Every structure is written in structure tokens, then in C-alpha cells.
Amino acid sequence: MTRVWILPLLFVLGGSAAATGLLFSGSPGSAAAVLLVFVLLAGVNSPLVFPRSISALEAQRRSAADGRPVVYWRPGCTYCLRLRLRLGTKARQLHWVDIWRDPAGAEVVRAANDGNETVPTVVVAGRPHTNPAPEWVREQARPGR
């Protein structure tokens, strides 16, 4: 099992335990609601919500060719999730690099953030931007900007 699935798995296990406790105390409706909330939390914190990650080298190559931003992120990051959800369908137009899966991507982020792995870090035209506003990123993703 890779590191990216640990947080979603913990959400599912925790929700299952809480739902089981509620079920045994005679609250099947509450148990179902709690389990649903935890499963949704697991889903949004899983790699399934984000576009498929590529390597930092491949992202840089593609960005140089098409001018689209590169987003460095990691699972479990609430700011990354906020960016992903606020971008909506535009997120698929960006190049996403999971820094937990790609050491070169983590190095790019550390170089841009004084040694810290602060994400999301969005690189546009070779310039890094740490935790930018989703509206700004959406504007950068527009073709012919």
C-alpha cells in the first residue's frame, strides 16, 4: 500500500468504527449518516479526486510545450483539495505532480519554498506561486492568456 492511501483508509476505518458504535447503541440512521460522511471524506482525500499525477520532469516538458501551469500537490492537503474543487473541470487542463510519489517534484517545491514542502505550489512560465488563489490559477489555465 502506498502512502497516498493511508489517510483515506484511516477515514474509512474510523467511520466504520464510529458507525458500528452508533449501530450497537440503537441509532441505525445516525450510523449510516456518519459512515457516509467518513466515506466522502476518504473519497475527497484519495488520489481518485485529483487528475492523474505525472512526474515533475514530464510535467515540466509538457508545460514548456503547451504553456499550461504545473501544480505540485500531495494527498491530504486541504489547500490542494480546495484548489482542485474550485478549479472544477479546468483542473484537467493542468499538469499535476504528487510530491509524495515523485521525489523530483518534492525537490522543486522545496527549492521554491525555502526548504519547505508547502503545497499547492503552482509553477507558471517557470515562476513558482505558493498556495495561489484558485481564480488566478483558473485564469492562467485559459488558452491564449
Image: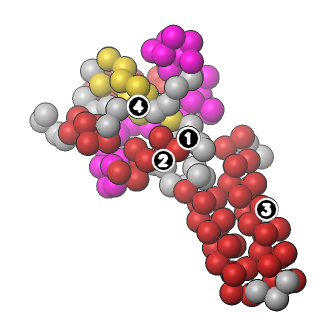
Splitting the image into 4 quarters, where does residue 8 fall?
A: bottom right
Extent of the magenta region: 87-116
The residue pinned by badge 2 equals: 81
**Quick check: 122 above or below 91?**
above
**Quick check: 18 above or below 107?**
below
What SS does tag 3 mark? helix
What SS does tag 4 mark? loop
Splitting the image into 4 quarters, where does residue 36 fall?
A: bottom right
Asked if labels 1 and 2 touch by Cβ distance under 8 angstroms, the answer is yes
Direction from residue 38 to residue 94 in the image, left or right: left
Asked if labels 2 and 3 touch by Cβ distance under 8 angstroms, the answer is no
Splitting the image into 4 quarters, where does residue 135 fall?
A: top left
Q: Label 3 vs label 4: CA separation? A: 30 Å
Residue 35 is a magenta residue: no
Looking at the image, what colour scheme do you see? secondary structure
Residue 99 is a magenta residue: yes
Q: Earlier in the sequence, mark 2 or mark 4?
A: 2
- Residue at 41% over, 25% down: 130
The residue pinned by badge 1 equals: 77
The residue pinned by badge 3 equals: 13
User: x%, y% of residue 107?
Assistant: 55, 17
User: x%, y% of residue 94?
Assistant: 35, 40
The amino acid at mark 1 is: Cys
* Residue farthest along the right direction in this orientation: 24
The residue pinned by badge 4 equals: 131
What SS does tag 1 mark? loop
Q: Label 3 vs label 2: CA separation? A: 21 Å
Q: Earlier in the sequence, mark 3 or mark 4?
A: 3
The amino acid at mark 2 is: Leu
User: x%, y% of residue 75?
Assistant: 59, 43
